[in-house]
Amino acid sequence: MKASVLSFRAAVLFVIVGMAWGIVMAVSQDHAAMPAHAHLNLLGWVSLFLFGIYYHLHPAIDRGRLAAIQAWVWIVGTAILTVGVGLVRTGTESGEPIAAAGSIIVFADILLFAWLVFRPAESAAARSALPAE
Ligand code: HEM
């Protein structure tokens, strides 16, 4: 699956969960988990959808294995970070290392995305021309 398709599909699934969570918070009037809801929506919906747009605009990168890895790592990191922040904000201190692990994963992954954006365009184009990719 192309990285853009993966990003768009995962982003839509994340925002369905994120919006449902927002409705639950609003109805229950318990906003304790608000930072987790915010991170789920901003990392899982907004950022992932933006990655998808970037990859769609750059087909040579979109077809590459690294872009798919970047999208998958972001998906996993977002889920881990959201669970960790949610646990911490609802009073479970053991969520701290989970939140820390998630934050390191997404930070490392944004560095990978930066590398994909900054690496020379010819290099990506040459890779896409290889039959193996
Ligand atoms: C059905 C849709 C949604 C509902 C019902 C909802 C509900 C809520 C609620 C109840 C809060 C807590 C507000 C507070 O305690 O001050 C909140 C906070 C927040 N939500 Fe949502 N939300 C929804 C969708 C989204 C989406 C799509 C995004 C991002 C793209 C988002 C981002 C945020 C952010 C950043 C905050 C924190 C705001 C602050 O710091 O004051 N939400 N949301």
Image (cartoon, helix red, strand yellow):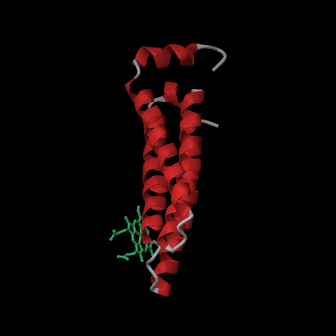
User: Exactly how many numbered labels are in the figure?
Assistant: 0
- Which residue is outermost to the front? 93
Q: Establish if 74 lies above or below 27.
A: above
- Name the foreground residue: 83 vs 22: 83
Locate residue 85, reporting x and y percent: 49, 63
Locate residue 100, reporting x and y percent: 49, 52
Residue positioned 56% across, 29% down in the render: 66
- Quadrant (top left/top right/bottom left/bottom right) for the C terminus: top right
Locate residue 2, reporting x and y percent: 59, 36
Q: Establish if 92 lies above or below 51.
A: below
- Name the foreground residue: 92 vs 44: 92
Residue 63 seen anywhere in this rendered image of the structure:
no
Residue positioned 41% across, 21% down in the render: 119
- Which residue is outermost to the left? 118
Locate residue 54, reporting x and y percent: 43, 37
**Ligand 1 lies in which image quarter?**
bottom left
- Quadrant (top left/top right/bottom left/bottom right) for the N terminus: top right
Residue positioned 54% across, 37% down in the render: 70
Residue 96 seen anywhere in this rendered image of the structure:
yes
